[in-house]
């Protein structure tokens, strides 16, 4: 206890803190459904799991990636060899109306396991309160270290995202699972598992009303809206926004895990919104895919997706802070993408294209429609990663303000409640939804 208090209060001591836990020496294996096995040592929770094995090329921000709900049920392989060297911060944000209650992207670890070449047992950072190992253990998430992640990544790049199992406490003589034993998370509606179950409000005193459809929102998306003084109502992913749309100045669709085809209910509702409502709409990642599908585009599963904070995208059109012909470096985490068709659906145009693989990185409504609707596959909110496209939030809210409602703020029928806030400690009044 005394040692822990000292470690928390003394950056000097913390810099040399080690957290070699009791299960560190357990053997562990990463098995892929395609037949390859990699052996190393366990850290974090001493339990075995199945999941979808994906790789991220991010150099920093393992804490933000691991708490991103879009990584739900994925075994995350970091291509950066040393992970954990700056520890893990406290996840409690100051309680004020301009924040969402967490520092990271959600309350806890969302990926099902992590694979690293070399887990750092020593960590050093002024905000760190614990090691990666102890954080994983607290959230019951297993990790494997001592694996040749370059070899795993090359395999995943060639054969595509592959079902896997992280088996803890087994040595090289233990048999790998049979192909039928692998569990495929993409058959489940993961969005339904991570979306808020009931509506809640953030920053109710903001000057503009934005409804957010929550497909598994990263906290920094909500933060980016409320720090620009939006009053935000976060709604379940399949909430009937059309029944309350007249009370809002803009609609935002968030990121979220899994296959977008599980979200057809939201796609069909959004199709009606697009036809009947003229206010600005902005979607990120899953939200962008839902907008594209509502517009008539198809989504497909990529070979290995794009995950990392170093993805270059080329702007094909100018809009707000975005200038056609410029390359922006972006943060990404996705397995699916919209199909590029020629022609594009009437009233829509490609907005961005990926410089590496030419996948669709953004779509927008054409000028002649008079509408302001955008979707981007990348994450302008970053967390972590580059801030090149962050001002798209300012652009969106600027358009919303230009068409602002004149209703008094109290006129919304989505009322506040205190239960079921996804991120925040209880600090808002009770919610009940009257249609
Ligand atoms: N970050 C996201 O929203 C990801 C969207 C979707 N789950 C995909 O993998 O493509």
Image: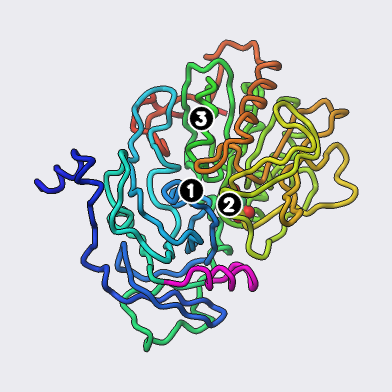
Do tag 1 and tag 2 residues touch (Cβ < 8 Å)?
yes
Q: Secondary structure at mark 1?
A: loop
Residue 361 rendering spot, x and y as whole percentages: 71, 46
Question: Which one is closest to the eye, mark 3 or mark 1?
Answer: 1
Name the residue: 66% across, 20% down. Answer: 398
Q: Residues within 10 Å of mark 1 (few under 14, many from 20)?
A: many
Residue 380 rendering spot, x and y as whole percentages: 60, 38
Mark number for residue 68? 1
Mark number for residue 433? 3
Residue 402 lies left or right of residue 257; in this view the side is: right
Where are the magenta residues, as a range? 147-163
Residue at the extreme right of the image, as rendered: 343
Q: Which image quarter holds the C terminus?
A: top right
- Main SS category, magenta section: helix
Do tag 2 and tag 3 residues touch (Cβ < 8 Å)?
no
Q: Earlier in the sequence, mark 2 or mark 3?
A: 2
Res. 420 visible in picture: no
């Amino acid at each position: 206890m005394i040692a822990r208090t000292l470690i928390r209060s003394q950056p000097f001591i913390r810099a040399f803190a080690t957290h070699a836990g009791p299960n560190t020496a357990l053997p562990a294996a990463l098995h892929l459904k395609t037949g390859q096995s990699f052996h190393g040592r366990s850290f974090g929770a001493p339990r075995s799991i199945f999941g979808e094995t994906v790789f991220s090329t991010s150099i920093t921000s393992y804490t933000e990636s691991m708490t991103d709900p879009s990584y739900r049920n994925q075994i995350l392989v970091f291509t950066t060899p040393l992970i954990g060297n700056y520890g893990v911060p406290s996840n409690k944000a100051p309680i004020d109306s301009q924040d969402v209650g967490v520092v990271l992207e959600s309350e806890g670890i969302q990926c099902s396991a992590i694979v690293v070449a070399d887990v750092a047992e020593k960590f050093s950072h002024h905000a760190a309160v614990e090691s990666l190992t102890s954080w994983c253990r607290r959230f019951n998430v297993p990790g494997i270290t001592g694996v040749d992640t370059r070899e795993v990544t090359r395999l995943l790049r060639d054969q595509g995202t592959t079902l896997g199992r992280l088996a803890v406490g087994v040595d090289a003589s233990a048999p790998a699972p049979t192909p039928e034993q692998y569990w495929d998370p993409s058959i489940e509606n993961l969005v339904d598992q991570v979306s808020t179950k009931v509506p809640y409000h953030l920053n109710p005193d903001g000057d503009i009303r934005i409804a957010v459809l929550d497909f598994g929102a990263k906290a920094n998306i909500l933060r980016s809206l409320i720090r620009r003084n939006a009053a935000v109502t976060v709604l379940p992913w399949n909430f009937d926004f059309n029944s309350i749309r007249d009370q809002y100045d803009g609609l935002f669709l968030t990121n979220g895990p899994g296959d977008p085809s599980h979200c057809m209910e939201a796609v069909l509702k959004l199709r009606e919104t697009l036809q009947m409502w003229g206010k600005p709409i902005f979607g990120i990642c899953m939200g962008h895919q839902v907008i594209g599908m509502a517009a008539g585009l198809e989504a497909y599963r990529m070979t290995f997706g794009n995950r990392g904070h170093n993805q270059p995208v080329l702007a094909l059109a100018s809009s707000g802070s975005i200038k056609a012909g410029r390359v922006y470096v972006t943060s990404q985490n996705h397995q699916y993408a919209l199909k590029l068709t020629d022609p594009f659906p009437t009233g829509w145009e490609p907005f961005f294209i990926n410089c590496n693989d030419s996948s669709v990185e953004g779509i927008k409504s054409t000028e002649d429609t008079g509408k302001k609707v955008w979707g981007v596959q990348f994450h302008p909110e970053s967390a972590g990663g580059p801030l090149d496209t962050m001002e798209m939030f300012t652009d969106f809210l600027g358009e919303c303000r230009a068409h602002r409602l004149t209703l008094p703020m109290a006129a919304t029928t989505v009322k506040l409640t205190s239960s079921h806030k996804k991120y925040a400690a209880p600090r808002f009044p009770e919610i009940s939804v009257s249609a």
